[in-house]
Structure formats: C-alpha cells, structure tokens
Image: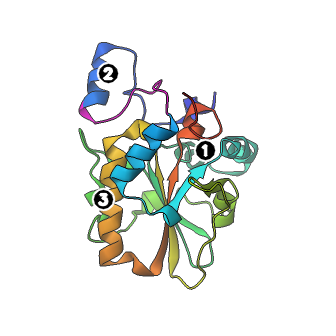
Amino acid sequence: MMRLHIAGLCVLLSTGCGRMLVGLAGMHAFDHDVTPAKADRLAQRMKIPAEEDLVLSQRYSHHLEAMRGTMKEKTFSVMYQPLQLRWYSKGGRAQWIIPNCDVGGYPNLQWSRFGLPDTLFANLHCRSYADSAWTLADDLRFMTSRTTGEAPVLRQDVDGYLLVYWSYFMGRQSVRLARHIHKWQENQGRAVEVRFVNVDSLMMGVDKPEVE
C-alpha cells in the first residue's frame, strides 16, 4: 500500500506503451529486482563518494504513516517521490523539498528549472512542502551508510544540509541528477553538507535492496 503514494510513477504501467515511455526515460521497470550489485553499478555511474552514500530504511514509511495526520497531505505525498532534493537550514529545519513530479521534462527531467547545475533554488510551491516541525534528525534516524551500515555523521560547521533522494528504478534520471549536484557542489555547494540517499527499499517494501 505504501507504494501507491509514490506520485510521478504513473508511466510505470504494464502496457507496451508504458514500458516504452519508461525505456525512453532511461528508467527501469517498477517490478525489476534490485540487487546490491545493480544498485552499486548505478551508484558508481553517479560517482557517489562513500562518505555521502546512504540508504533509507523501510521503517521510514511506517513513521510517515504515523505522522500523516499531523502534516499537510501534499507534504505527505511528496515524501514518497523516488527523486527529490531536501534542503535543511544550518539548524536542521526543513526549508524546502523539490520532488521529481515538480521538475517536469521528458525524456529527461529538467532540473535547470531550479537553477542546476550552476545554482540551486526552490520556488514558493516547493517551499510550501516543507513542514516546519520536520527536522533533519527525523530523516537521518532512518538512514545508514549504504556500504558500512553505520549511522550517518554530519558536520556541524556548514551553512545547510542537502539530501538527494535517488533510486535504481529511476535509472538515467538518478545519474543525471547526481551529475548536476556534483557540478553545483563545485560551483556553490562547498559549504553545504550533501548526502545521497538510496530509497529503493522504500519503494520495494523491503529493508535495503537485497532481493536476488
């Protein structure tokens, strides 16, 4: 049932047309098994540094369901998006969320609408997704290092925090987003702590992508 909340995946249909659209966008079929090797290969293409590589536990979806009555419905929905950018202040308060459903573009998502890769900004609509009561700690408690399994440790002497949600299912779109973020880090993001978060476990309904 959790996966029904993932907006923006309506093209992942069982029809031939749906499969064609998925292929043109460089995505993988939603029912495709995600093995550690497959996730690793995509992470390598994304050039994610080991210290920035996290994975989201499926326990996160249970937490969201428990919090559903206390947050705006639109905020609840975007938190299931397979690609998103989440910005937090220096104090760890959520400032904005850019979900893939707001980016638009086909066959490739056009992140340039939010300034990438040269800069990064969010419009008022994306700022409205942020719940003032939601903090960085609310996200990190459900994340571990994808390689070591240890809890993430973030620097404190930074101007802000950016979580980049990605998934194997989004294939080429995950790679393109990572390239934009790397270039942005070189241009403007050096004072921002960045973490890439694999969310395939949330989408598949299992804890970590370990299905052979």
Is the residue 39 above or below the residue 122 in the image?
above
Give the Cα separation between the discs numbered 2 and 1.
30 Å
* Identity of the residue drawn at 29% across and 68% down: 183
Q: Magenta stretch: residue 11 in it?
A: no
Among the 4 quarters of the image, the one containing residue 178: bottom left
The residue carrying mark 3 is 179
Horizontal and vertical percent for residue 22? 31, 29
Nearer-the-camera pick, 82 or 125? 82
> Which residue is denoted by mark 1 in the rendering?
73
Whole-percent x and y of residue 80?
55, 42
Give the position of the N terminus as an image quadrant. top right
The spot of residue 28 in percent (x, y) is 37, 31
Residue in the image at 35% along x and 68% along y: 120
Q: Name the residue at 65% across, 54% down.
A: 149
Instruction: Give the structural element (helix, strand or loop) at label 1.
Output: helix
**Residue occupying the far bottom of the picture:** 157
Per the rendered image, the range of residues in magenta is 24-34
Q: Alpha-carbon distance for marks 3 and 1?
A: 31 Å
Q: Earlier in the sequence, mark 2 or mark 1?
A: 2
Q: Amino acid at mark 2?
A: Arg
Report the residue that reaches farthest toward the right.
66
Residue 19: which disc?
2
